[in-house]
């Protein structure tokens, strides 16, 4: 099966990232992964700190830099780099992983990070894949009716993500896709989790389709009990 880490950050774009895009690509390739999803942070504070914050097209160019650098490195290694977004709205500290998008989509939707979760779902819920990252890390209320899936196992070693609560919510709402990730930011974060597919998924749209079809398995040694319980019920 083909291993993908679906939640990876780059130093070039995410302010909390400590690993260059090409370096993460090389690390994951060496670990036997077929690809990664680059999901750099996108929220209004991040945009406001840019000197081009009032020019959305320049903001997108700046934001895409990390993923584009990863893509260059991946192409040289026959390694899939999939574009995603870790989106946060001004209303709270919940984070959402967005797939089934590309640079053109981002350019066509200026300042999408200034919406609220409900408006975003109403506008884009039929066309993109929305997965809530680490649902209970910062928040106690999860708007499960505005997402398509949940990270039931987030393996970032510096945060208490309360994965058990995420699994419980997934059990209560079996229509939600169950996913896992390394949430990699720093050296050593890589390779803690994977989504396994029977075939390669080359871009964000193929990834979205495979997840929607539930054509995948989960791998996460650190939270093997959660993965085992989660998969047994799917």
Image: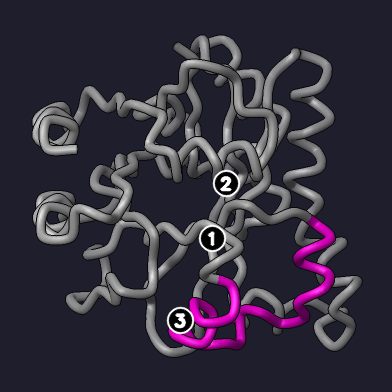
Which image quadrant is residue 75 in?
Answer: top right
Q: Which residue is mark 3?
A: 117
Q: Is residue 86 visible in this depiction of the protein? A: yes
- Above/below status of 9 relative to 220: below
Which residue is label 2 attached to?
Answer: 9
Q: Earlier in the sequence, mark 2 or mark 1?
A: 2
How far is the residue under mark 2 from the one under mark 1? 9 Å
Q: Quadrant of the N terminus?
A: top left
Q: Which of the labelled discs sits on residue 119, or is there none?
A: none
Q: Secondary structure at mark 2?
A: loop
Q: Splitting the image into 4 quarters, where does residue 35 fall?
A: top right
Characterize the local packing of mark 1: few (<14), some (14-19) or many (20 or more) Cα atoms within 10 angstroms.
Answer: many
What residue is at 29 percent from the left and 45 percent from the top? Answer: 178
Point out residue 50 in the picture as x, y percentages from the top left corner: 78, 76
Mark 1 lies on residue = 86
Q: Nearer the viewer, mark 3 or mark 2?
A: 3
Q: Is residue 123 left or right of residue 132?
A: right
Q: Earlier in the sequence, mark 3 or mark 1?
A: 1
Graded by Cα atoms within 10 Å as few (under 14), some (14 to 19) or many (20 or more), the crowding at tag 2 reads: many
Q: Which residues are magenta?
A: 103-124
Number of other residues with Cα within 10 Å of mark 3, as a class: few under 14, some 14 to 19, many 20 or more: many
Q: Is residue 10 above or below residue 98?
A: above
Is residue 18 depicted above or below 201 in this figure? below
Mark closer to the chain start, 3 or 2:
2
Query: Residue 220: horizontal and vertical position, in percent?
Result: 27, 27
Is label 3 or label 1 in front? 3
Secondary element at tag 1: strand
Left or right of 225 in this view: 6: right
Foreground residue, 21 or 111?
111
Judge whether residue 164 is colored magenta.
no
């Amino acid at each position: 099966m083909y291993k993908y880490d679906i939640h990876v950050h780059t130093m070039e774009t995410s302010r909390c990232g400590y690993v260059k895009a090409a370096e993460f690509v090389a690390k994951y390739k060496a670990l036997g992964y077929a690809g990664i999803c680059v999901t750099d942070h996108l929220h209004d504070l991040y945009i406001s700190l840019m000197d081009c914050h009032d020019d959305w097209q320049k903001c997108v160019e700046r934001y895409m830099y990390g993923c584009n650098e990863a893509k260059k490195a991946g192409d040289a290694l026959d390694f899939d780099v999939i574009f995603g977004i870790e989106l946060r709205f001004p209303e709270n500290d919940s984070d959402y992983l967005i797939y089934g998008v590309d640079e053109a989509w981002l350019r066509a939707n200026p300042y999408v990070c200034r919406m609220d979760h409900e408006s975003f779902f109403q506008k884009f819920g039929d066309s993109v894949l929305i997965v809530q990252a680490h649902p209970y890390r910062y928040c106690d209320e999860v708007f499960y009716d505005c997402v398509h899936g949940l990270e039931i196992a987030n393996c970032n070693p510096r945060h208490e993500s309360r994965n058990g609560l995420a699994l419980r919510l997934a059990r209560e709402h079996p229509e939600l896709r169950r996913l896992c990730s390394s949430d990699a930011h720093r050296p050593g974060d890589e390779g803690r989790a994977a989504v396994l597919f029977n075939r390669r998924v080359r871009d964000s749209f193929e990834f979205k389709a495979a997840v929607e079809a539930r054509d995948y398995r989960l791998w996460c040694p650190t939270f093997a009990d959660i993965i085992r319980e989660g998969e047994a019920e799917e």
